């Protein structure tokens, strides 16, 4: 039980289920019922087997007492497993500690606890205190049943009967009370600890635990934006498009009728410094508004803060300050409600290795309230859309899938049940070109009915899928706009690439200076050089002519002239921001 509970936590499957709409109470009830049924079957087999091989322990003691004892113990054990699972995040450690506890409490019970029970000079209070450990209470119960069965078979009478519970030496009544109280207490404590540690939940402050369940989200907003307090300082340093987005967010927050799919209001994420390292500001006051039907792409170098942003939006981590709204629901308050209309394709696939692709989709589709024929159709369509339907691939266990198949399944999961807001963190990572194209078609189709936030390192993907892009460097947007706008704004130059032998590099330099005095060399490696030629200084025909003439003087292996690509824009913006930050 412990390993099972910790596994779902370790593999982030629990938070994934939550993000797809599974509420805490049903999760607990289903898991509890599953463990309970397993334990009851196990205990019943154990008792029946003991009865049929003629053990007096089972035959002579009253069946009702045996039933109550085992019933209470099973429940205590499940509650104890839930409680202990709150303290572990590694299955290996939990399993080792679990085994040490089971064997340790058994051995200590037989060699130490037994001695205290039978030593009549030892304080009964201390024995009761020791029985708080579930392993010892089990041992005490079995001991009492064993003693009565032994006495019954010696005298030819029965074992423990209901009336014997009042016997002064019989500890059964005490342990039944202790176990029942402990069962209830551990359940409450385990639930409470789970809520406290559940970063995705809306509760971090213990005092808010009970309040948050009563609170219903207020439709947006017209409340003063947290951006407003800080924005004046920030705006002065921001690019105009980023500042404009911030102003739009402020306006939307004041507007009662605003119905944007996503509004981020000055989101910040600070990770506390560890091992002597300073605090890390991963997201610095991000403001963004995203209507339905739009796919917004976040481009940024490694470590820019894209995953930190998505983690906040999907409730994996809480913002240090600021907040965001998905269809008017606040990510710091109403995450459980947001999950019912949200889809997520995480950076790393969160899947059960032992379930099939189809079972995953059935499970998540049911969480999105799909039923009957609509459910079967949605699952089949979804499998077909990601090429996992034919050849029975969807019926194979996920453990047998390739990386690309797992990725496609993750995308299918994020889109099942028509969520209103979908977050995709590098969805095409590891896909071959054909699968990637297929994935792009799925995303294009899906964005008609929802808003999509997508992070990617592929400029091609960003250009194909995204209606708007934001280049994100060191925790903040450097620019926001649609791909064409960004290329026009940052790409007022042609990129001229020439490959010669390294000795001819200076010849190429002179050629370029003659063509465009303010050309900028952006790349140089063993004879291959790249220049930016400002568009107002050069004509394409002049470049062709100059290269043809140069070919008669020295050997040009290859050359090319292209308009600025999104990749050039990205490199330029990212480099510019890094230089600025270094200077600052
Ligand atoms: N839990 C954490 N504790 C401390 N620092 C963290 C934590 N998570 C991320 N960071 C730091 O925050 C910064 C942003 O990380 P993040 O993973 O959000 O970047 P990213 O843009 O998603 O990168 P990539 O493209 O490589 O996935 C990085 O410097 C990272 O080291």
Image (cartoon, rainbow, N blue to C red):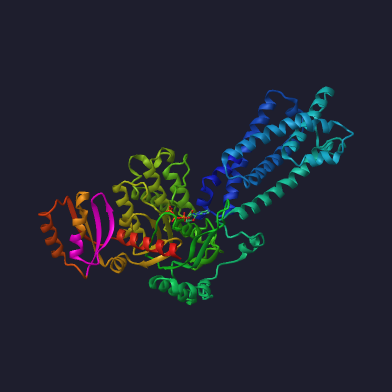
56 relative to 323, above or below: above
**Foreground residue, 472 or 372?**
472
Q: Quadrant of residue 98?
A: top right
Q: Residue at x 62, y 64 (%)?
A: 214
Q: Is 404 displayed left or right of 106 in the figure?
A: left
**Residue 480 appears at what percent x and percent y?**
37, 67
Q: Residue at x 54, y 45 (%)?
A: 10
Image quarter (top left, top right, bottom left or bottom right) of the N terminus:
top right
97 relative to 327, above or below: above
**Foreground residue, 393 or 260?**
260
**Residue 529 appears at what percent x and percent y?**
24, 55
Q: Is 527 displayed left or right of 146 in the figure?
A: left
**Foreground residue, 346 or 256?**
346
- Does 514 appear in magenta? yes
Is residue 246 among what the camera can see?
no
**Foreground residue, 235 or 13?**
235
Q: Quadrant of residue 467?
A: bottom left
Q: Is 462 displayed left or right of 86 in the figure?
A: left
**Residue 37 appears at what percent x and percent y?**
61, 40
- Does 255 appear in magenta? no
Q: Is 562 displayed left or right of 260 in the figure?
A: left
What is the span of residues highlighted in magenta in the rendered image? Answer: 510-535
Count of number-bearing discs = 0
113 relative to 333, above or below: above
In this view, the residue farthest toward the right is 121
**Residue 354 appears at what percent x and percent y?**
47, 39
């Amino acid at each position: 039980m412990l390993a099972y509970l910790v596994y779902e936590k370790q593999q982030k499957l629990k938070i994934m289920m939550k993000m797809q709409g599974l509420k805490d109470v049903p999760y607990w009830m289903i898991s509890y019922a599953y463990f309970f049924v397993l334990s009851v079957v196990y205990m019943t087999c154990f008792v029946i087997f003991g009865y049929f091989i003629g053990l007096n322990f089972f035959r002579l003691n009253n069946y009702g007492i045996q039933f109550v004892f085992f019933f209470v113990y099973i429940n205590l054990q499940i509650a104890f497993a839930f409680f202990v699972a709150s303290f572990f995040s590694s299955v290996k450690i939990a399993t080792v500690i679990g085994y040490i506890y089971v064997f340790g409490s058994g051995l200590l019970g037989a060699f130490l606890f037994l001695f205290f029970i039978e030593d009549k000079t030892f304080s009964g209070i201390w024995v009761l205190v020791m029985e708080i450990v579930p392993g010892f209470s089990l041992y005490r119960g079995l001991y009492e049943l064993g003693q009565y069965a032994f006495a019954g078979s010696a005298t030819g009478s029965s074992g423990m009967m209901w009336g014997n519970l009042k016997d002064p030496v019989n500890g059964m009544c005490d342990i039944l009370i202790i176990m029942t109280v402990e069962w209830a207490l551990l359940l409450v404590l385990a639930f409470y600890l789970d809520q406290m540690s559940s970063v995705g939940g809306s509760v971090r402050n213990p005092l808010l635990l009970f309040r948050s369940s009563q609170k219903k989200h207020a439709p947006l907003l017209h409340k003063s934006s947290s951006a407003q307090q800080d924005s004046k300082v920030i705006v002065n340093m921001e690019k105009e498009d980023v500042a404009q987005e911030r102003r739009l967010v402020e306006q939307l927050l004041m507007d009662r009728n605003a119905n944007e799919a996503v509004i981020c209001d000055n989101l910040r994420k600070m990770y506390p410094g560890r091992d002597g390292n300073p605090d890390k500001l991963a997201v610095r006051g991000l403001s963004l508004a995203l209507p339905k039907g739009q796919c917004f792409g976040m481009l940024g170098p490694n470590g820019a803060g894209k995953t930190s942003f998505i983690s906040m939006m999907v409730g994996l981590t809480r913002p240090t300050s600021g907040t965001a709204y998905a269809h008017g629901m606040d990510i710091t308050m109403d995450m459980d409600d947001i999950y019912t209309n949200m889809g997520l394709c995480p950076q790393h696939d969160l899947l059960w290795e032992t379930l099939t692709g189809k079972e995953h989709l059935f499970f998540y589709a049911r969480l999105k309230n799909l039923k009957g024929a609509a459910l079967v159709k949605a699952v089949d369509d979804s499998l077909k859309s990601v090429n996992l339907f034919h050849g029975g691939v969807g019926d194979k266990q996920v453990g047998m899938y390739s990386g690309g198949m797992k990725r496609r399944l993750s995308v299918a999961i994020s889109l099942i049940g028509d969520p209103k807001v979908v977050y995709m963190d590098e969805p095409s990572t590891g896909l071959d070109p054909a699968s990637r194209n297929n994935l792009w078609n799925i995303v294009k189709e899906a964005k008609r009915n929802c808003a999509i936030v997508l992070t990617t390192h592929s400029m091609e993907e960003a250009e194909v899928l995204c209606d708007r892009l934001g280049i994100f460097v060191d925790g903040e947007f450097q620019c926001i706009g649609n791909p064409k706008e960004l290329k026009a704004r940052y790409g007022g130059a042609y990129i001229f690439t020439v490959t010669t032998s390294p000795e001819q590099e200076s010849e190429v330099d002179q050629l370029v200076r003659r063509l465009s005095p303010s050309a900028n060399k952006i790349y140089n490696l063993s004879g291959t050089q790249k220049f930016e030629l400002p568009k107002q200084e050069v004509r394409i025909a002049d470049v062709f002519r100059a290269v043809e003439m140069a070919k008669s003087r020295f050997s040009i292996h290859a050359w090319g002239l292209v308009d600025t690509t999104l990749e050039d824009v990205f490199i330029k913006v990212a480099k510019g921001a890094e230089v600025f930050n270094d200077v600052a």
